[in-house]
Image (cartoon, rainbow, N blue to C red):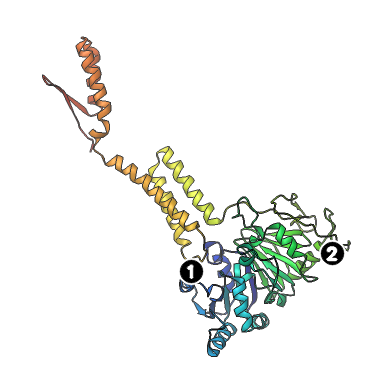
Amino acid sequence: MTARLLVVMGSGETSPTMVKTHRDVIAKLPPRPRCVLLDTPFGFQENADDIAARAQAYFASSVRVTVDVASLRSADEATVLERERFVSDVRGADFVFAGPGSPTYALEQWSAVGLGRVLREKMATGGAIVFSSAAALTLGTRSVPVYEIYKAGIRPRWLEGLDVLGATGLSAAVVPHFNNAEGGNHDTRYCYLGERRLSTMERELPPGCFVLGIDEHTCLTLDLETASATVGGIGTVVVRASGRTEALPTGTTLQIAEIAELAIGLSRRRPGSPGSPGSTADPEPVPDGSDTTTSSTASPSPSTGWATQDGPLAGNADASPLSKAISGYQARFDAAMESGDVPSAVAAALDLEDELAAWSNDTLQSDQTDRGRSVLRSMLVVLGRLAEKGSRPVATLVKPYVDLLVGLRDGARSDSRFEQADAIREGLAAAGVQLRDSPEGTAWSVTEAD
């Protein structure tokens, strides 16, 4: 039997940070696996073709696998044959991938063709499902209408999810972009919900359902063959229940059942108490929460070594991997220019160009790559100015200084300070400047070195 994997990514599904995860998943599948990309989440966008093509290029160049598009951009507009072809493509694939777009739109289209049932069957028969970002939001028993809440201002509420996660035995609402910090002066953690809204929604979850948070550029791989769960990427996976959280850092491996046990323990634990996941303490009321990034300090749990908190989980204020890389190359370039190390400055610019090329097929829709190109262009301007100065004739560059010294020499000669005048002539000659005295004055020329 082929592997049975459900991989949930917080973001970065087509970025360099997730290449290893994709390759690890492909390695567990049969040789020459059939791989498909679901275009539904972004199917309503005018640039849908471009997004799909970039994702295909990413898998071809970085993961070294061919990915076909299983297309269902509108269930209402698709013919019966097109709908059935989509379902057949998914059912027959070894690797099913979906990522950016709108979770609400994807849910509406996928529910119309019973995709949740098809994916749960795949978890039983074999294959890999890799969902990230918007698509990841659809995997749980509940989903979040992110854009409608964050951009349109509808009342925070849950939607019915596909409950593919239920095939693993977990009853949860998946929340990617869990540590998002784009808001700056306002709380955009928890996929742009913030603490206040998530706290309100959390109280509306059905009994036994918890929040499974996935940080950006982080993934949770659920292996049904071994009943194990592994955290990969650069952040944490967070189990949250009743406003209390337990963070599993990258590299953590545990049984899937332990995740459910953590959620049960958190829902029963009194705020501030050290209770274990199996604690039977009476549950406390859920705090109202607020739009603040302040939280209690995380400390290692004696029994697990994971970071445990009561109350909101502090947002990760670090920038995204690409943004941090851009800043790093900028710092290298600036330091090299400050020290006059032009080759190192050029190397920093070339490395930044390589970095942007590595991210060129990412379906991330933000201004980060634009910022990177802007930084690179600024580096080129600085190097161009340096080249412009270096390409000017030496005589033009040194003229103000030579004219000053010639004037001082003329003054010394007028005052009969011939020894000082000769010293100036000899010093200039040693520097490659030859003086020629005549009744009309002193002329000079530069002998440039080979």
Q: For residue 1, say whether it is visible.
A: no
Count neighbours of disc 1 (C-alpha within 10 A) and say few if under 14, some if 14 to 19, many if 20 or more: many
In the picture, which quadrant includes the N terminus? bottom right
| Mark linked to residue 301 | none
In the image, what residue type sits under mark 2? Gly
Number of callouts: 2
Label 2 and label 1: CA atoms lie apart by 43 Å
* Residue tagged 2: 278
Quadrant of the rendered image containing residue 303: bottom right
Q: For residue 109, say whether it is visible.
A: yes
Quadrant of the rendered image containing residue 229: bottom right
Upstream in sequence: badge 2 or badge 1: 1
In the image, what residue type sits under mark 1? Tyr
Q: Label 1's element?
A: helix
Instruction: Find residue 306 and report its horizontal and vertical position in percent.
Output: 74, 57
Instruction: Find residue 193 and report its horizontal and vertical position in percent.
Output: 66, 61
- Say left or right for 50 vs 12: left
In the rendered view, would you say 237 is above or below 403?
Answer: below
Instruction: Say which of 27 and 392 sits in front.
Output: 392
Instruction: Find residue 25 and report its horizontal and vertical position in percent.
Output: 59, 72
* Residue tagged 1: 58
* Circles 2, 1 touching at the beta carbon (< 8 Å): no
Name the residue at the top extreme.
416
Instruction: Find residue 49 and report its horizontal and vertical position in percent.
Output: 46, 74
Which residue is found at the position 62% from the left and 51% from the top? 317
- Say left or right for 359 vs 386: right
